Amino acid sequence: MADSRETFVNQAFVVGYPIKHSRSPLIHRHWLRRFGIEGSYEPVAVSPEYFEAFIADLKRGTSGFRGGNVTIPHKEAACRLADVPDALAEELGAANTLWMEEGRLNATNTDGIGFTASLDAGHPGWENVDRAVILGAGGASRAVVQAVRDRGIGEINIVNRSVERAVELADRFGPAIHAHPMAALGEVCEGAGLFINTTSLGMDGGAVDEMPFERLLPSAVVTDIVYVPLMTPILKQAEAKGLATVDGLGMLLHQAVPGFEKWFGRTPVVDEELRNLVIADM
Ligand code: ATR
């Protein structure tokens, strides 16, 4: 009997609402062209009231999709509706990558892996530090906190404008994670070897107060998940103080890799050509 997967067409989606700003089609279509795969990657706008029906269609196997990416506002629902969410998605309560396997809908969250893969590429050895500071405790921060914890960094300090959100995150992700108000930023930067901005500060050219980067270790790495502009005010401040920096674009590119592997069966590379393609679109 024919493998039922052979009846799928080579098609994946990114589903969100709205969806027109997603850069995922640019990334996946580039890789499809690179491999010469006859396939497609389609943005699909689905409003929240229709998301469950969209997933039901996917599970029936009649949609033509092998799977796809999920973005705002559907990441939590995608995790809940999947048949097999993996441990990463389950702990986060949110999924950004779905794929059908043996008739069941699998889900994972690749944001954290994308983040650490970007640091691995940009500054190998970044994880060999005793203390990290993570600024921000919103949706984007969760996957970063989880991923940094999973790489074994001993002490993680989350600093957030609303301290209660930092406390909730710290409680959720483990005993070596501490929550602090903004007023403690200078103190927690003292002797830290990794600083991560997960807030929207500096996005689209917004101004940012002076960060206490002189208190970080001279060997510290500063990274920002904001990637518009590529050289954010936070990265500029770090560079001015002689610190190493890794920009946020790598996370966007690397988080896309596992999905492509699942749907199209090939392992794509994140290289300068892809970076430049996305930069040209910004
Ligand atoms: P996302 O899903 O992109 O993380 P979010 O959940 O709205 O979006 O979180 C935005 C993060 O940026 C939060 O940590 C937010 O701080 P609060 O939790 O106190 O709202 C932070 N943030 C946004 N604007 C900020 C500002 N002007 N100063 C400090 N932090 C800010």
Image (cartoon, helix red, strand yellow):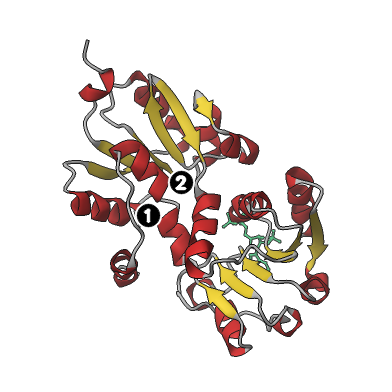
Image quarter of residue 178: bottom right
Q: Sort mark 2 into few (<14), some (14-19) or many (20+) by Cα contacts within 10 Å.
A: some
Q: Position of residue 52 (x, y in %)?
A: 45, 27
| Label 2 sits on residue | 71
Question: Which labelled disc corresponds to residue 22?
Answer: 1
Instruction: Please report the residue visible at 80 percent of the width from the left and 58 percent of the height from the top.
Output: 179
Dot 2: element = loop
Examine the rendered structure and indicate whether residue 140 appears above or below residue 236: above
Q: Nearer the viewer, residue 58 or 267?
A: 267
* Quadrant including the C terminus: bottom left
Q: Earlier in the sequence, mark 2 or mark 1?
A: 1
Callout 2 touching callout 1 (CB < 8 Å): yes
Give me the C-alpha separation between circle 2 and circle 1.
9 Å
Examine the rendered structure and indicate whether residue 216 appears above or below residue 58: below
Instruction: Please report the residue visible at 69 percent of the width from the left and 53 percent of the height from the top.
Output: 152
Q: Position of residue 118 (x, y in %)?
A: 49, 62
Dot 1: element = loop
* Disc 1 Cβ-to-ligand 1 distance below 8 Å: no
Tell me, yes or no, if residue 30 can be seen here.
Answer: yes
